[in-house]
Image (spheres, grey):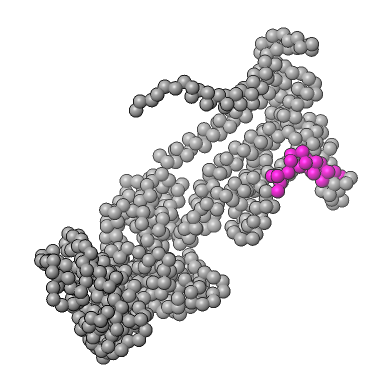
Amino acid sequence: MARITLSNLAHSYFPDPKGEADYALKEMDHVWEDGGAYALLGSSGCGKTTLLNIISGLVRPSQGRVLFGDRDVTDAATSDRNIAQVFQFPVVYDTMTVRDNLAFPLRNRGMDPAYVASRVNQIARMIGMEAELGRKARGLTADAKQKISLGRGMVREDVNAILFDEPLTVIDPHMKWELRTQLKSLHREFGHTMIYVTHDQTEALTFADRVVVMYDGRVVQMGTPQDLFDTPEHTFVGYFIGSPGMNLLEARVEGNRATVAGVSLPLGADYGAPRGRVQIGIRPEFVSLTAAEGLPVTIRRIEDVGRHRIVRADFNGTGINAVVGEGTALSPDMTRLAFSPEHIGVYADDWRVSPQGSRAGRAA
Amino acid sequence: MDKTPNQKAWFLVLPVLVLVAFSAVIPLMTVVNYSVQDTFGDNEFFWAGLEWFEEMLGSDRLWNALGRQVMFSAIILAIQVPLGIFIALNMPKKGFWASVCLVLMSLPLLIPFNVVGTIWQIFGRVDIGLLGHTLAALGLDYNYTNDAFDAWATIIVMDVWHWTSLIALLCYAGLQSIPQAYYQAAKIDQASRWKVFRYIELPKMRGVLLIAVLLRFMDSFMIYTEPFVVTGGGPGNATTFLSIDLVKMAVGQFDLGPAAAFSIMYFLVILLVSWVFYTVMTNLDKEEVR
């Protein structure tokens, strides 16, 4: 087990990258603490899998170093890194039995047969496949095969880290919950460093202690689920996390007031005079529907999703969403949206601006 | 669901019936016809019953040719299958050299059989052939026209040259279809090269290998043109395989009755072996799933 350090790391799939656009991963410096449960979250094509493959050694980075603990493993082969990885689609050895599949990584490392047998049984119990141990893997369903892949990823106790590359894509929804819970309890039990790639925020937020959000080849924020919700460092985080995501409005900010299309709004702190493309962001949870104050809007529709209602409104062509509690009464004259000032974030060129007087905040 | 009976639909299968009748059924029946009759010319035929079959089954000639044929097929399969797999494993996976390899590998397959025979016939000649002359110059007593072993060696090497590409190309196609994740998983599981082959590549190539072996078996079992051009079945009868013997009998000696009986038995052997092969392989498949 080890702390993973990515130092000055960048990767391009072109042999001779010209500009920043040629890089699938932009330069980054990060430390992944030993024993942490991380989720790597981002939309398709943002570099999540590339980063994962660099950590596991399947891809060699164009620049920078990868360290496990104090050991530089940038040039080490995958097999020397002592890492387990589970892929998006099931990879099983068709001609082997389920038991042999699970035992394969252990036997290849010359483990004691008695230990292999007991460990395989333990893992089989965990993934709920004890009854199928003697069966050939060929001909099993896709989710059974993926459970074997997961099992093979977790069967070794001494790994430096376990990497999961969207492992639950092919699994039935009810089984997803169960497996995710098992991964979580496994993490608590053995304390492996786990890195879990996903584009599903629910999956990321329930699995991980720390969520790493990637956007366009960059890590835009690394933080607890609460951090991501309260203080998104980048507009992408605001928009990607939350359902619906954060509302973003073009604005002019001066001190502790923002002007949105001629309407002046109070902010929770003094932001000075940020330059570039300035936006304010507010989560729908902190937007309330009123009759008297705030931005005048056109209400498009109201969706009742059970626990609460989502109000879809339109302000000068920009959509704004508000989350309204089930108990709150709504009346037809409520055509204004008020923002809770302390929950408004200010963004310049998509990055969060820290209020004046607090510590500077570009958390890249 | 109500179906409207429409007997006119039978006309739709008529073209196929006619085609199969003329291409397979009628020629086969002619052979059957010859095999149960005797003739002394003048288009006069006498009923002979199963006499020709009895005669052929009792003759050493047929059994010897069959023995040579089985040995030939066994040898070339034993060489071509492992060699083809080995070549496929070592071909470049993509890029310029992959295309070059593919073209080079396809070349022997495109050459007409009698040309292949002629090439090797000349190539192996001791007086003017590059191979034969070189071997002779190296002090080897090589002469495929009067040494049975040399004749066999020449024909086997020729067949390997001609047909190994087929197996290699089929296996290559099978290998290309293996998703990259399998190799990555194997690396992570610390599988050795041999285990990657044994547990990933071989199982994934299974389908194409089955086809390849079946094709190579049938073709080699029916081989005629190349040995006919190179050795003419000699020296003596050393390389007289089934079809060469059959042609000698039917066209050379004009023994239509025995030759027809011979053909039918030859056909049945191929049919039987292919059927057994196919059944065994598909059953193995089912057993694995269970």
Give the quarter of the image for residue B78. Answer: top right
Q: Main secondary structure of the magenta part?
A: helix
Q: Nearer the viewer, residue A61 or B184?
A: A61
Q: Is residue B2 left or right of residue A25?
A: left
Q: Is residue B87 above or below residue A284?
A: above
Q: Is residue A121 above or below residue B47?
A: below
Q: Position of residue B6 (x, y in %)?
A: 44, 22
Q: Position of residue A231 (x, y in %)?
A: 27, 77
Position of residue B266 measured from the top left corner of the image (x, y, whole percent) = 66, 26
Q: Position of residue A275 (x, y in %)?
A: 35, 86
Which quarter of the rendering shows the C terminus of chain B? top left
Above-or-below relation of A182 to B206: below
One can see residue A171 in this view: yes
From which residue to which does the magenta span run?
Answer: B107-126
Q: In the rendered structure, does residue B117 fall within the stretch colored magenta?
A: yes
* Residue at the spot 20% in from the left edge and 83% down from the top edge: A266
Query: Quarter of the image holding residue A286?
Result: bottom left
**Which residue corresponds to the image point at 50% horizontal and 73% vertical from the top-left?**
A22
Residue B205 vs A123, above or below: the answer is: above
Front in this rendered view, residue A239 or B125 = A239
Magenta span has A21? no
